[in-house]
Amino acid sequence: MDESPVIMVCLGATKAGTSSLYKYLHDHSECHLRSLKELQYFSAIEFNDYDHQYSVLDRACEDLAKRREVMRQKDDLWRVRNIERQINDRKEMRRILEKGQSGITDYLYYLLDGLEGYKLTADISPAYACLPQWRLEQIATMAPNVKFVYLLRDPVDRLWSHVRMLTERRLLKPENAGKDFHEHAKGLLRSAIKTKNETHILERGQYKEIIIKLRKAIPKDRLFIGFSETVFQEAGLRDLCAFLGISYKADTKAPHRHQGKKSELRGALKQRAVRFLADEYKFVFQQIGDPPDRWLENSSLLLK
C-alpha cells in the first residue's frame, strides 16, 4: 500500500461542484490545501496562458491587499495574517508560472510544502480537463501517489450555469450596460448550440471525449468519476473519501457553489439544449450508470 501523501488533481467539470469539493477538503483535518483553489499551472504551460493567469493572480493580490488594510484598521490581526497568507500563496504561484515548463519541481514543492502530518493536498483546476492525453499522463506520473477526480453534472444544467456565469461577466462591460440578463444568456446559449462559436463553453462539458481521454491516460485505480448531484451526500462522500485514503467526515454545510444570478431555462430552448447534448447523456448512462434523478428528469425531454 502506497503510504506517500496523495496529490489529488480535480479537473472539472466546470460548474459541477468543484468549489464545494475544495471547501470540503480544505476543512478536513487530514488535508492540507493552499488558499488558492485553482493553481492552473498545467493549463498555463500547455496553452501559453501565462498573461491571463498573471492577471488573475495580480488582481486577486490587489483585492486582498485592500481587505488587509480594512482588517488592520479594525485591529483584526487574525484576519490580517490570514489575508497575508493568501497573498503570499498567489505571489508564489506567480513566481512558479514565470519559470514555465521548468517550474514543475517548484509546483510540486508548492503543493507538498507543509504537508507533514497530513494525508492529502490538492490542485482543483477544472480547465485541466481540456489538456491533451500526454499532459495528463505527465501529471499522473509526476509523484508517487497522484489521484484524479472528475465530477459530472447534468449536461444541460452545467451548460446553462456556465452560460449564466459568462453572461454576468460580459454584462459588466460598459458596452453591454442595460441589457437584459435572461435574454442575453439565452442568446449566448443559442450561439453555443447552433453556431458552436462559444467552443470554450462546450468543450468543458464534452463528457464522452474527456472520460475516454482520462481512462486512457490514468490508471483505473487512480481515477474517480462521480456525479456532483450525489457526491456530497453521505454515500457519495464515503466513496470519495475511501478513494482518496482519508477518513469520512460528514458534510454538515450547504454546498459551496458559485451559483451566480438565477435564471430558469425552460420550454423549447431547454429541449433544444437537451437534444444537442443527447450523446453526452447516452454515453454517461451507458459507461457510468446509475444517474441521479436530475439527469433522468432532463433527459426525458429527449422523448418529447
Image: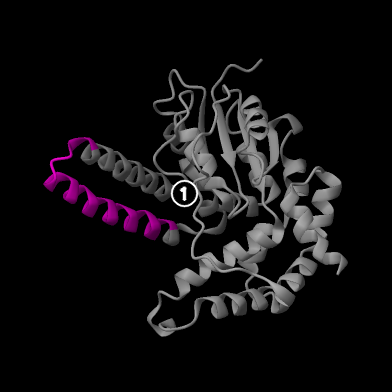
- Can residue 213 be seen here? yes
Residue 62 covered by magenta stretch: yes
- Name the residue at 67% across, 40% down: 137
How did the renderer colour the structure?
one colour
- Can residue 124 be seen here? no
x and y percent of residue 232 in the render?
A: 60, 38
The C terminus - image quarter: bottom right
Image quarter of residue 199: bottom right
107 versus 118 height, above or below: below
- Name the residue at 84% across, 65% down: 302
**In this image, 89 relative to 205: left or right?**
left
- Name the residue at 40% across, 50% down: 98
Front residue of 295/115: it is 295
262 versus 176 height, above or below: above
**Dot 1: within a 10 Å radius of its alpha carbon, few (fewer than 14), some, or many (20 or more) residues?**
some
Secondary structure mostly seen in the magenta stretch: helix
Counting every numbered tag in the picture gives: 1
Front residue of 220/18: it is 18
**In this image, 296 relative to 178: left or right?**
right
Instruction: Report the span colored magenta.
Output: 53-78
x and y percent of residue 186 in the render?
A: 61, 77
x and y percent of residue 223 in the render?
A: 70, 36
113 versus 23 height, above or below: above
Residue 276 covered by magenta stretch: no
Q: Dot 1: what SS?
A: helix
x and y percent of residue 117 in the render?
A: 44, 17
**Residue linked to disc 1:** 100
The N terminus - image quarter: top right
User: Amino acid under label 1?
Assistant: Gly
Front residue of 83/49: it is 83
- Name the residue at 66% across, 34% down: 236
**In this image, 258 relative to 198: left or right?**
left
